Image: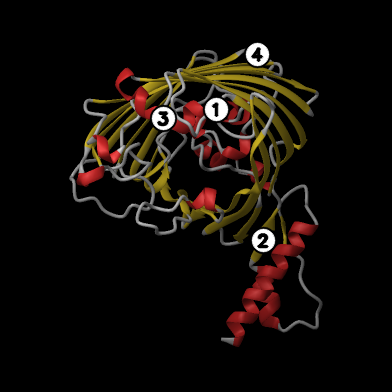
Amino acid sequence: MKRSAFTLLLLIGCTLAAAQEPLPQATPAKRHSSAQPDGERSLLRRTEFYTPDSLAMEPELLERLRNMPNIEVGKGITFRPKSNWFELTMRFRMQNLLALSFDDDFTLKKTEARVKRLRLRFDGYIYSPKLVYSIQLGFTSYDTEPLPDGDMNIVRDAIVYYVPNATWNIGFGQTKIKANRARINSSSALQFVDRSIVNSEFNLDRDFGFFGEYNLRPGDGFNLSAKASVTLGEGRNWGSSSHGGLAYTGRLELYPLGRFKAKGDVIEGNYEYEERVKILLAGAYSYNQKASRLKGQRGAIMPDDATRNLGSYFADFVLEYRGFAFYTDFMGRSCDRPLFSPETGAFVYSGKGLNLQTSYLFDRKWEIALRNSTLFPEREIQPFAGYRRWNQTTLGVTRYIIGHSLKLQADVSYNAYTRLTNPDLYNGWQIRFQLELGL
């Protein structure tokens, strides 16, 4: 036990030392003085530590992982033995948020101040670069999103991919469903404090199952990606379902003018400053058979052990050019029987939503962004939603210090409801400030 503890402390110490002295390229870890026992020197000789950009020397691995949005290569601290039989990249990030909500008379109605996201990630490969894993844990109440039975829910991603080449891969485990662009984007790569109200209502979030992707080889011309999954349909960490239904999702992405720089299609804004116009056209559909939660993979359990068949549809358009970016997302949910017994008050939010946003980046330091989002619930559920239409307009400013790894963000939003009947809702303003820090 003492030897194991000593070895663990030694590894942690070496990791911290490597983090304090970033190197331009991968180099072996420094040996200790000659006073060290031979066993310790031997351990260090078999160990290499890599700085965040060191994976640039692995073009084949980068090529294989390029189209996997939940694998962010080239960040954090990477550990790899000289035998190269495994690799581990450790990362963390946090978002500290302050938000103030006002009514139309600028009376303060709500104050929110908290650590919104606090996450720890482990990515890499084991045995072979073709066998890739990704683990992500969340530790705040926003991240955990307790299950309806009250169980905590800290595991966000836990998936293993087989990546034989850059063309295709298949994964098994829990991760994001590849449906709409806004949800595929990492919350660390947003140009506003958070995603839109349209995404918040209709996104599919995460689920457990099989995930597959096919990608044409990268080039300057036309390109495409096809992504599909078969999942449990009840959301992350649900465990088991007695209803027998599954969720089937497919997404097709077209790049008529070639791929974006550095995954620009899944990072909001044009931080990489595309020299040529780049466009993404994408569509997705998901069919959740016998869903037992009101939003499919999310939400409360349907009353009286009921189930519903839910259809979700998505369309995305992205254009980026020389610091300018324009996005639009259209998405919605259909259900043949969205209402339940009146006394339950439960309903499936069937309807659609449209999100438009544009931005411009100045000198890779300051970014101005404008977003307009509108929700359109179907007529029969409008009395339960409490409005006929919800529109939110947001103006955001971002100061990039170290790209998306260290940035300050502020935005102001105005919420306007049409035919508002819910007393808990009101027209008014929201001001938010956020610090994003990650390694």
Gap between marks 1 and 4 measured at Cα: 44 Å
Select label 3 or label 1 by which is in front: 1
181 relative position to 226: left or right: right
Q: What is the number of the mark on residue 426?
A: 1
Gap between marks 3 and 1 measured at Cα: 22 Å
Disc 2 element: strand
Disc 1 element: loop
The answer to whether the residue labelled 3 contacts the one labelled 1, judged by CB atoms less than 8 Å apart, is: no
Q: What is the number of the mark on residue 276?
A: 4
Disc 4 element: loop
The answer to whether the residue labelled 1 contacts the one labelled 4, judged by CB atoms less than 8 Å apart, is: no
Quadrant containing the N terminus is: bottom right
Gap between marks 2 and 4 measured at Cα: 39 Å
Q: What is the number of the mark on residue 202?
A: 3
Residue 349 in percent (x, y) is at 35, 29
49 relative position to 337: left or right: right
